[in-house]
Structures are given as C-alpha cells and as structure tokens.
Image (cartoon, grey):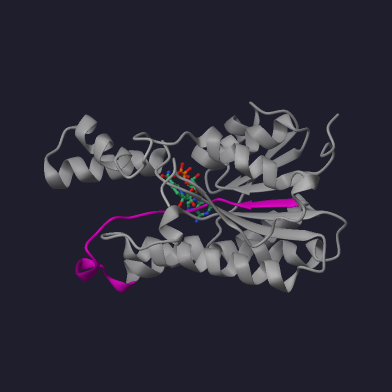
Amino acid sequence: MTELSGRKAVITGGGTGIGLACAARLAAMGIETILMGRQLERLEAAAATLPDARAIRCDVTDDDSVTAAFSAAGPVDILVNNAGIAAAKAFHRTSMPEWQNIQAVNVDGLVRCTLAVIGSMRTADYARIINIASIAGLRGGAYVAPYSASKHAVVGLTKSLSLEYAKTRLTVNAVCPGYVETQIVEDSVANIMAKTGRTREEAIAELAKTNPQGRLIQPDEVAETVAWLCSPLSGSVSGQAIMISGGAI
Ligand code: NAD
C-alpha cells in the first residue's frame, strides 16, 4: 500500500515512450492506470505488463472517441496528457493541414481530454493534471514552429488552469523535456539522416548537443517528475512548467 493506492490515472498515448514510462511509474505507486491511445492491441500488450492496468481505445482528436473512453474509464484522479506528435520542416514549406494536424493532437486533443475530467476534478478531494509539454514550449525552435507553438499553448493553458482552479484540490502542471529517447526522436534522427546525409550516430549527436549533459534523456526520468507531481505533498506546486533538460535553460 502507498498513499496513492486506489487512485486512478489516465495516461493518453500510454502505450509507448514517455506515456508508458509514466504508466509504469504510477502503477508502481499502487495507482490504477488506464492507458488510452489509438492502437488497442499495442495498449493491451503494454497494460498486461503492469499491475492493475487496462487499455481503452481513444483518439484524442475525436469528440466521440474521447467521450466514450472517459465514460468507460469512470472518475479519474490523475490525467497525464501525454499524446502528442511532432514534425520538423521549414516553416515556408508547411501547409495549413500540416499545421492543423499538430494543433489537433497536441492542443485540441489535450483540451478535449482535460474537459472530460475537469467537472469531477474541480470538486474532488485530490486531483492532478500533468501535461507533457516540451522545452519547445518555452523557447522557439527553427524548423519546428507548429510543434513549438502547440507546446507554448500547452504551457499557457497549464498556467491559466492552475490559477482558475487554485482554490480547489486540483493542481495543473506541465513537464518540459528536452530530447527523450523515444519513437519521436527516432523519427527526428531518420529525418536528419535523410535530409543531411549524416550517419545515425552523427544525427543523435546533433540532438544530444542541445542538452548541456550531452545526452538524450530517458523516459523514466520524465516519469519520475510526473510521479512527484502526483504525490500529495506536491499539492502546493501548480502552474509550473518544469524543464527536464539536462540543465538547458
Ligand atoms: P511517442 O511517439 O512514443 O508517444 C506519443 C504517443 O501519442 C504515441 O503512443 C501515439 O500513439 C500517441 N498519439 C498520437 N496521436 C494520438 C491521438 N490522436 N490519439 C491518441 N494518442 C495519440 O513519443 P514520446 O516521445 O513518448 O511522446 C510523448 C509526449 O512527449 C508527446 O506529447 C511529445 O510531444 C512529448 N515530448 C517528447 C519529447 C521527445 O524528445 N521524445 C520531448 C519533449 C516532449
């Protein structure tokens, strides 16, 4: 038993990368975890590796899908808004559908899931919303304008909601990682290799250079901060955008 045993957490995009690491860390704290995402088989396989975990299909860009998923989940104590996509491209080559696609997942999808839980969270005796933003939500980045703009929106939303619900028991925080070793970074590495002719090692080194520690961050390191934000004693921490970046400021 831990102090959070019996609490329930939803992790969107919970079948892979940072989301799965968060689910595993919260499960180790005795929290019931619900992994939401688009690929039910992959989610079920991930949930089967965790105690007291289940998978629910959910596409965060779809109203009906989100409504059905959160209705199947029942009341939720912790929401980790993790589902996200990234793309790297020169801004002048970006089409409106490409821009909208990123905002649809990273911003609208996160808002949709937040709206699905906010009604019960604002009157609960304990509630946490943790948004997985990015270091790109705190500063600009060449070739990632739509992604950076989407994560700035997440940080702005986080700060506003934390003020709006400050008198309740809900805290709302964002975590802002640098490059984390997941599929998103694998895709960036492939993109750099294709566009610049660099080797895989050179492409990884290019990304790692943005981290003063000179390395990629591990998903478990992000999950550790998420776990701390869930603890009852973090109740006075709200509206923060916490960098997990090897010292990049
Ligand atoms: P990932 O690709 O493994 O995880 C993203 C998850 O979101 C996947 O499971 C994917 O299926 C899910 N997803 C995408 N669109 C969805 C939709 N419409 N509905 C439901 N689920 C959807 O990569 P990751 O690095 O673990 O990314 C997780 C989060 O961390 C993202 O929000 C990302 O922006 C953020 N992030 C990642 C890094 C990094 O370097 N990897 C750095 C900073 C922030």
Q: Quadrant of residue 51?
A: top right
Q: Which residues are magenta?
A: 78-96
Whether residue 42 appears in this view of the structure is no
Which percent across, then down, holds residue 165? 75, 69
Q: Nearer the viewer, residue 121 or 136?
A: 136
The answer, for residue 163, to whether it is visible in the render is yes
From the top left corner, tell me how far across and down residue 166 is, in percent. Answer: 76, 68
Instruction: List the single residue furthest toward the left.
Output: 197
**Where does the image place residue 141, in percent across and percent down from the top left?**
32, 60
Which of 89 and 133 lies nearest the eye of the viewer? 133
Q: Is residue 217 left or right of residue 223?
A: left
Q: Is residue 191 above or below residue 239?
A: above
Residue 41 sits in quarter: top right
Q: Does residue 21 appear to the left or right of 162 in the view shown?
A: left
Quarter of the image where one finds residue 120: bottom right
Q: Is 82 included in the stretch rendered in magenta?
A: yes
Query: On the picture, is 5 further left or further right than 50?
Result: right
Q: What residue lies at 43% left-to-right and 52% top-to-bottom?
A: 249
